[in-house]
Amino acid sequence: MMAMTRPTVLCFSGFDPTGGAGIQADIEAVAAAGCHALPVITALTDQDSGRFYSLQPVDSELMAAQIEHLLNDFQPAAIKVGLLAGQAALKLVSEVVQVTTGIPVVVDPVLAAGGDGTPLGEGSIAQGILRQLLPFTTLATPNISELMVLATADHQDVDLSVDQANDPQETLAARLLADGCHAVLVTGTHAPGDAVVNRLYRTGEDVVGRSWPRLPGSYHGSGCTLASHIAGLLAKGVPLPRAVDIGQRYAWQTLERADKPGRDQFLPRRLWREEFTIADPEE
């Protein structure tokens, strides 16, 4: 008897040679959701577990050919977008998102390196994401810093005073929703405190916050892991609020089990279930 075919997720991300973030994170987190990743690399990076050195965008003609051949062969059930290193990649991915209507799109707006905060991509990339990509996005997963950059890319006059709103983060998220994004999950990994608080914003719905114990140390690839696993769950038909909840728990568990094969940041252990299955096979 043939096995049931797994849903596929078209993933656009950069290549991280540490394997902690980028396309490897997508592949592993999507696989952990029971789906198959279709990886399209948008940029090659030179980085280690603590420092970012350089970035080289992938040739846009090669990317276009890969996309064409994949879409002629597969029918993705979801799309996940990570690092877009330039306008050419942004244009290609935006076109794909606009023509593959009816499937969920998860955007993790990678604007800086997770290790040392080095800015990634061109200066205008945030404005391009806001205008060309977010109006077609099911879920965006910015951290607080990325939220600020995106929400003010076209709205330099945003007033974050307490007179306007008790929660400036909600004001910023509302900007993205007003620009067409269906839902925004703001991750609290970059905020201080003993807990990481993630908040899901949707138009006309109550804000849903989840709090997770902050783990000691620094982690590389947590955002990619979260967004990709949610994309895999959406590809399987899991409703958005449930997918966000499961995705957060999965991401936290990968960090709880993370190890430190290099000298600096911890790397998420995204396939820990498979490791345990191999070590202790069922009789």
Image (spheres, rainbow, N blue to C red):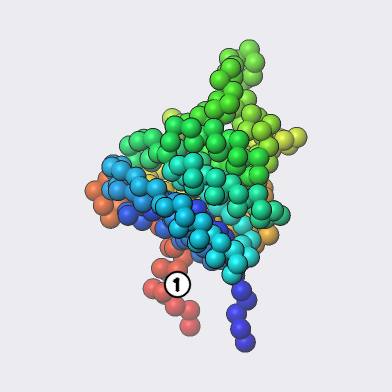
Residue 19 in the image: above or below residue 51:
below
Residue at x 54% of width, y 27% of height: 153
Residue 181 position, x and y percent, is: 65, 39
Residue closest to the eye, 58 or 206: 58
Q: Position of residue 210 (x, y in %)?
A: 58, 40
What x and y, as percent, mark residue 177?
Answer: 67, 34
Furthest residue in direction bottom, as rendered: 1
Pick whichever, 176 or 86, lies toward us.
Answer: 86
Q: Which residue, as the protein is rendered here, is positioned at the far front? A: 61
How many other residues sit within 10 Å of disc 1, few (<14), some (14-19) or many (≥20)?
Answer: few
* The one of 31 and 189 positioned closer to us in this rendering: 31
Q: Horizontal placement of 263 versus 229: left or right?
A: left
Residue that extends furthest to the top in the rendered view of this protein: 163
Residue 106, image x and y in percent? 59, 48
Farthest residue toward the right? 204
Q: Is residue 161 visible from the viewing direction of this image? A: yes
Q: Image check: 77 left or right of 220?
A: right
Residue occupied by mark 1: 277
Q: Is residue 23 left or right of residue 54?
A: right
Secondary structure beneath dot 1 equals helix
Q: Quadrant of the N terminus?
A: bottom right
Looking at the picture, does residue 145 appear above or below residue 104?
Answer: above
Amino acid type, mark 1: Thr
Q: Residue at x 32, y 54 (%)?
A: 18
Residue 250 shows in this picture: no
